[in-house]
Structure formats: C-alpha cells, structure tokens
Image (cartoon, rainbow, N blue to C red):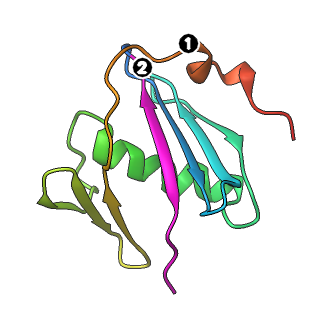
Amino acid sequence: MQFALNGYLAMSETGGKRLVITENFGQVIADLLIKPDGKVFVMQSSRMFPARYIRRLVAADVECVFGGTPKLDCPVTMPDPNHFVIDRGGYKLDLRILEIKPGAQPADLFDETKAPKS
C-alpha cells in the first residue's frame, strides 16, 4: 500500500527540527519536534500515525536525512539532489524537497509547550 503525504520541515539555527505531516486535504496526521539535544516531542498524533510510531520511526527518518551526522542504521540513498529514499525493509520513504525557504524560523515552532490543542 502506498500513501502520498505532504509535509513541512522547519530547522532552527540551533539544530532543532519541526516536522508537520498532512494528508492531501490538509488534516495534520503527525507533528514532531526534535530538540537540538535529540529529545523528541510528539506535538500531535493521529490514528494513521500514533505517537509511538512518530517517536520511534518518523523521528529516526528525520534524523537520518537531516541530522547532520551520518548514522550507521540510516539506509538512505540520494538518487538526485533533494531526493532521498529510505528503505527500512518494512517500509520505504521516498522524500522529495520541492521548495526551500531560507531564513530564521519563528521560535514558537521549536517550543514543546506550544503543542496544538486537540
């Protein structure tokens, strides 16, 4: 089974990462914050992406591609610039960066106390 999802990744100047994954109609199905020290916060989860899945797998994939230091358990290939494929056997993630917006990101994006209200 294959799913097409959209996402937005913001990276702070200090190394924090915030990933929001949405389905095609804009519903948030996963919202993840990774602090510069590697601590993971699930800001929002869904039935499709439960918190345990986000914490264990989605966070690992974000760090695999955007962590800055290569990891031994990071099965990523780059067929083209801005195209990453992670194949973990049980699933495959085909990630393409379509747009990059440089510049400072809002500090609230990287504050774990600012989780959206459910």
In the displayed structure, 49 sits above or below 97; it is below
Q: Is 6 in front, or is 37?
A: 6
Residues drawn in magenta = 1-12
Count of numbered circles on the image = 2
Q: Is residue 32 left or right of residue 35?
A: right
> The C terminus appears in which quarter of the rendering?
top right
In the rendered image, the residue lying farthest to the left is 80
Q: Is residue 32 above or below residue 79?
A: above
Give me the residue at 59% from left, 48% from top: 55
Which residue is pictured at 35% across the width and 16% down the height?
Answer: 103
32 displayed left or right of 95: right
Crowd class of label 1 (few under 14; some 14 to 19; many from 20; radius 10 Å) = few
Residue denoted by label 1: 107
| Residue type at numbered disc 2 | Ser
Q: Secondary structure at mark 1?
A: helix
Write down the residue under mark 2. Answer: 12
Answer yes or no: do the residues labelled 1 and 2 have beta carbons within 8 Å? yes
Residues under labels 1 and 2: Cα distance?
Answer: 8 Å
Q: Amino acid at mark 1?
A: Ala
Vertical position of residue 14 compared to residue 62: above or below? above
**Can you give x and y, in whole percent of width and height, for residue 86 in the image?**
30, 64
Camera-side residue of 23 and 54: 23
Residue 93 position, x and y percent, is 38, 67
Report x, y in % for residue 10. Answer: 45, 31
In the rendered structure, does residue 38 fall within the stretch colored magenta? no
Which is nearer the N-term, disc 1 or disc 2?
2
Where residue 109 sits, quadrant-wise, is top right
In the rendered image, residue 54, in percent from the top left (x then y), is placed at: 59, 53
Residue at left offset 72%, top offset 51% = 45
